[in-house]
């Protein structure tokens, strides 16, 4: 009777993990949809200045921005000079509030886009942990592994936020999509070429086959710190696999919900389908062709 009760509890624990993943993903997408709706409302009307990108930090906290002191502005102005100007980039000064909100946007977006594709690995952890607990050798809670995975994407979000700050004035439209055919071409070509690289293949292999990842890195860890580190390492492989695809957000629009969904679906298919390297190669070829077409359009 006691064993049956324990088995039922452990099985329920795995269901709770699955439900938690679904809930986090749903909440992330609700947030994305809300930001997209706010971005549409904040779009400049005819006759207004349309040169300033309406990023989520601006849309959500205009009053806080106006109240910030002049030190932030001075620092931003200093950033306009030097190497950035030589590259044709003139970043608009951001306040701390705006930067924090933009970072939050990227973090939530990465949760919504990437957590579903990590579900098989996380559920495998919960499954193995259930059997280990029955044997009296429990693993650290599944949340440590999942947390490490999300921390890796949090680091990526920090880099993406910095990238958005660098290019929004010179290369993005008010809706945070590419405003330059040349820039679009560069991003598409880079993303297309990366789909053919050995590094892409190596990272994708670790994401497609959780068992291979575990065998390569010594299996799951029993201590929380080790579990967190293993999740972080798995997240780094996923960042290595998908960073170029995430860069496509700067092409179609960071707040373009359909574009976000399309990339998320492709990432899910790329990781979960048994197509091997076929799907990445097809996508890479298409991206290369589109990028070259953009270069031709820019030169015309």
Image (spheres, grey):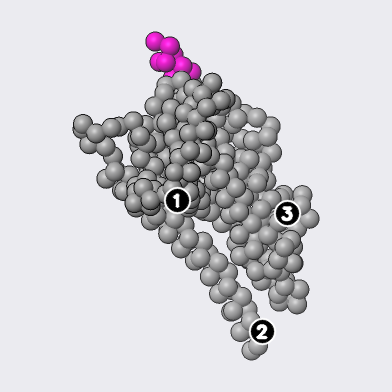
Query: Is any part of residue 189 visible from this angle?
Result: no
* Residue wearing tag 2: 3
Q: Position of residue 265 (x, y in %)?
A: 47, 44
Which circle's residue, 3 or 1, is located before the other in the chain?
1
The secondary structure that dominates the magenta segment is helix
Q: Residue furthest top?
A: 300
The span shown in magenta is 292-300
Please report the residue visible at 55 percent of the width from the left and 30 percent of the height from the top.
191
Look at the numbered discs 2 and 3 and tell me whether their residues touch, using CB distance below 8 Å. Answer: no
Would you call the spot at circle 2 few (<14 residues within 10 Å), some (14-19), or many (20 or more)?
A: few
x then y, percent, for residue 194: 60, 30
Of labels 3 and 1, the one closer to you: 1
Q: Residue furthest left?
A: 46
Q: Which residue matches tag 3?
A: 214
* The residue positioned farthest toward the bottom in the image shown: 1
Camera-side residue: 15 or 149? 149
Residue 286: image location, x then y, percent: 49, 26
Q: Which residue is mark 1?
A: 97
**Closer to the observer: label 1 or label 2?**
1
Residue 47 visible in the shown view: yes
Instruction: Identify the mark at residue 38; answer none if there is no mark.
Output: none
Judge whether 136 appears above or below 185 on screen: below
Mark 3 crowd level (few <14, some 14–19, many ≥20, 10 Å Cα):
some
Left or right, 134 with reference to 180: right
- Is residue 249 highlighted in magenta? no
> Residue shown at 46%/16% (left/top)?
295
Q: Give SS at disc 3.
A: helix
**Camera-side residue: 70 or 53?**
70
Which one is in front in this view, the residue at disc 2 or the one at disc 3?
3
Q: Residue at x 52, y 27 (%)?
A: 81
**Residue occupying image coordinates x 42% and y 31%:** 169
């Amino acid at each position: 009777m006691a064993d049956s009760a324990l088995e039922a509890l452990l099985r329920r624990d795995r269901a709770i993990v699955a439900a938690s993943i679904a809930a986090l993903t749903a909440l992330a997408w609700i947030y994305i949809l809300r930001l997209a709706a706010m971005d549409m409302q904040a779009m400049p009307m005819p006759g207004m200045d349309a040169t300033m990108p309406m990023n989520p930090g601006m849309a959500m906290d205009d009053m806080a921005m106006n109240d910030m002191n002049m030190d932030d502005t001075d620092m931003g102005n200093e950033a306009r000079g030097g190497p950035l100007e030589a590259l044709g980039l003139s970043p608009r000064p951001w306040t701390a509030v705006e930067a924090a909100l933009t970072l939050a946007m990227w973090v939530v977006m990465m949760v919504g886009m990437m957590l579903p594709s990590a579900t098989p690995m996380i559920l495998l952890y919960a499954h193995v942990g259930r059997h280990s607990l029955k044997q009296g050798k429990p693993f650290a809670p599944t949340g440590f592994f999942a947390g490490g995975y999300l921390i890796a994407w949090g680091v990526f979000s920090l880099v993406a936020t910095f990238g958005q700050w660098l290019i929004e004035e010179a290369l993005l439209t008010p809706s945070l999509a590419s405003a330059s055919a040349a820039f679009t071409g560069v991003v598409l070509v880079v993303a297309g070429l990366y789909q053919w690289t050995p590094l892409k293949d190596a990272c994708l292999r670790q994401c497609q086959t959780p068992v291979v990842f575990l065998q390569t890195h010594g299996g799951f860890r029993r201590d929380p710190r080790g579990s967190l580190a293993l999740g972080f390492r798995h997240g780094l492989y996923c960042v290595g696999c998908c960073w170029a695809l995430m860069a496509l957000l700067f092409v179609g629009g960071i707040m373009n919900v359909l574009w976000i969904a399309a990339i998320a679906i492709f990432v899910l298919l790329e990781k979960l389908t048994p197509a091997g390297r076929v799907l990445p190669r097809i996508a890479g070829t298409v991206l290369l062709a589109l990028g070259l077409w953009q270069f031709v359009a820019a030169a015309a």
